[in-house]
Image (cartoon, rainbow, N blue to C red):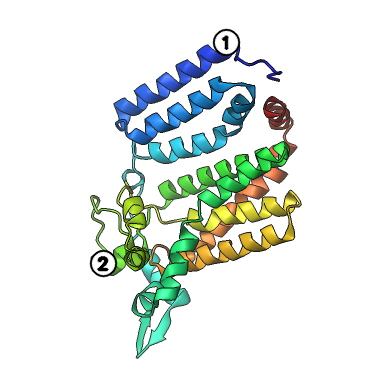
């Protein structure tokens, strides 16, 4: 346990500085440093050395830092170098399972929504999709700050585990999103830039470039399966219920969750198949953690030490 000391021990300080320096050097060598790498390192170091309270927070946030680093580091060895990219197969499966008949033609739901949309739906789609990471992270911070440290840690670790399962899925089955098939056909083009797809209508509606700035930085468009957009709010909702949060909060989370599922398809960013696999990914992560890892003595002891460290 950290105790109430203002400054970390020499051992802790040296370890943190060495790991942070190693992260920056390795990132510079493998994928190149960007401003967000310095921001992440700076925030962590500032929290760790500012005082005992913020040091606990820095350690508590490690699952989220590891999530961000893991996602970024997939640039080192892209998934399409591991397995073939699925463009046509997923499209045809979606059409077969969920096709919509319009004027004698069968459209996938994303194609239907590309032809049938309205400003109100475009606005809410953008609002829902902007919630996909900020709301779960804000929920985690809320759990932490109100003192539910063990529930927070379970949530944060499951959030990380679900992401790692999803990232593994990207490598097992590299897949193009619906907008790719709709715009480019079925031949994979590796240097295809990110695309806002239907979310561009939100930017146009508000006269801003929120989603253009987000998707313009996407390094790999062939990572559509499973939809982690669909997974995150499932995790947040489950732990809101486990943590006995207010019923209104669980209700809000449920609305956001379903709204994100709908937006994923409405905007052309994910097939319904992707969304269902994303939901399955979240449920698998929760099950593996709660019924597997937390029943394993070595992991449970690690969890207890970690939770004491941040209390």
Q: Position of residue 54 (x, y in %)?
A: 60, 27
Question: What's the residue at 41%, 32% (across, down)?
Answer: 39
- Residue carrying label 2: 183
In front: 13, or 277?
Answer: 13
Q: Quadrant of the N terminus?
A: top right
The image shows residue 251, relative to residue 171, as above or below, that is below
Q: Is residue 221 visible?
A: no
Q: Residue furthest bottom?
A: 103
Does residue 23 appear to the left or right of 164 in the view shown? left
Q: Residues within 10 Å of mark 2 (few under 14, many from 20)?
A: few
Residue 13 position (above or below residue 84): above
Q: Locate residue 290: give its quadrant.
A: top right
Task: Give the class, few, some or many, for how many residues have Cα within 10 Å of label 1's Cα (few <14, many ≥20).
Answer: few
Element under disc 1: helix
Nearer mark to the viewer, of 1 and 2 = 1
Q: Which of 212/172 is in front?
A: 212
Dot 1 or dot 2, earlier in sequence: 1
User: Mark 1 highlights which residue?
Assistant: 11
Task: Determine the secondary structure under disc 2.
Answer: helix
- What residue appears at the point 73 percent right and 29 percent down from the top-left corner? 304
Q: Which mark is residue 123?
A: none
Residue drawn at (56%, 66%) of the image:
258
How far apart in space, not on screen, are marks 1 and 2 (Cα)? 55 Å
- On-image quarter of the C terminus: top right
**Rendered image quadrant of residue 122:** bottom left
Most distant residue in the right direction = 244
| Residue 73 pos. (x, y %) | 39, 36
């Amino acid at each position: 346990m950290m105790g109430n000391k203002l400054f970390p021990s020499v051992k802790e300080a040296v370890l943190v500085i060495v790991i942070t320096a190693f992260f920056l050097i390795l990132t510079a060598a493998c994928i190149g440093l960007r401003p967000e790498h310095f921001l992440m390192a700076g925030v962590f170091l500032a929290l760790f050395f500012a005082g005992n309270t913020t040091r606990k927070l820095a350690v508590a946030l490690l699952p989220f830092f590891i999530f961000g680093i893991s996602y970024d580091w997939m640039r080192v060895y892209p998934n399409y170098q591991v397995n073939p990219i699925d463009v046509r197969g997923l499209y045809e499966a979606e059409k077969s399972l969920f096709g919509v008949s319009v004027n004698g033609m069968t459209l996938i739901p994303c194609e239907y929504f590309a032809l049938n949309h309205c400003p109100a739906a475009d606005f809410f789609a953008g609002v829902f999709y902007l919630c996909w990471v900020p709301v779960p992270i804000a929920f985690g911070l809320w759990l932490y700050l109100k003192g539910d440290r063990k529930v927070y840690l379970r949530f944060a670790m499951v959030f990380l585990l679900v992401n790692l399962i999803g990232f593994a899925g990207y490598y097992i089955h590299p897949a193009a999103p619906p907008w790719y098939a709709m715009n480019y056909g079925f031949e994979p083009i590796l240097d295809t830039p990110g695309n806002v797809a239907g979310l561009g209508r939100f930017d146009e509606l508000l006269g801003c470039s929120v989603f253009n700035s987000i998707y313009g930085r996407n390094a790999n468009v062939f990572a559509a399966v499973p939809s982690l957009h669909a997974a995150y709010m499932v995790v947040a909702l489950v732990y809101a219920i486990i943590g006995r949060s207010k019923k209104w909060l669980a209700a809000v989370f449920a609305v956001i969750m379903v709204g994100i599922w709908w937006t994923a398809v409405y905007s052309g960013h994910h097939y319904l198949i992707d969304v269902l696999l994303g939901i399955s990914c979240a449920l698998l992560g929760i099950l593996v953690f709660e019924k597997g890892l937390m029943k394993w003595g070595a992991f449970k002891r690690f969890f207890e030490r970690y939770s004491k460290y941040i209390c």
